[in-house]
């Protein structure tokens, strides 16, 4: 059994989206694709969990910027 850290898996939870949203979230890292079911926990490599976290943070920044622009009347 490999103890390589790249093979370690972690649990992630992908929340459900709007009712008409896709039932799975597509994630690709280094040419490897994953379809993660929404509303369920999945075991994924650490690199996929990291990408999901970076995506969530980018979405938060986008949302804050949109609120600031709308609040300033721009």
Image (cartoon, helix red, strand yellow):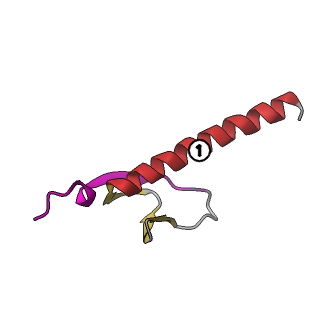
Q: Is residue 12 above or below residue 68?
A: below
Give neighbour class at mark 1: few <14, some 14-19, many 20+ (Cα, 10 Å): few
**Quarter the C terminus occupies:** top right
**Quarter the N terminus occupies:** bottom left
Q: Is residue 16 above or below residue 24?
A: above
Left/right of residue 5 with respect to residue 35 in the rendered view = left
Left/right of residue 2 with respect to residue 67 in the rendered view = left
The residue depicted at 52 percent of the width and 55 percent of the height is 16
Q: Is residue 16 above or below residue 22?
A: above
Residue 11 included in the magenta stretch of the image: yes
The residue depicted at 46 percent of the width and 53 percent of the height is 51
Secondary element at image label 1: helix
The residue depicted at 53 percent of the width and 46 percent of the height is 56
Percent x, y for residue 55?
A: 53, 49
Residue 61 included in the magenta stretch of the image: no
Q: Which residue, as the protein is rendered here, is positioned at the far top?
A: 72
* Residue position for label 1: 58
Quadrant of the image occupied by residue 8: bottom left
Q: Which residues lie in the magenta part?
A: 1-17
């Amino acid at each position: 059994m490999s103890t390589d850290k790249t093979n370690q898996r972690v649990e992630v939870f992908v929340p459900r989206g709007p009712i008409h949203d896709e039932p799975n979230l597509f994630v690709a890292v280094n040419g490897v694709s994953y379809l993660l079911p929404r509303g369920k926990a999945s075991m994924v490599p650490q690199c996929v969990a990291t990408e999901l976290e970076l995506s969530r943070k980018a979405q938060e920044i986008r949302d804050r910027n949109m609120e600031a622009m709308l609040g300033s009347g721009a």
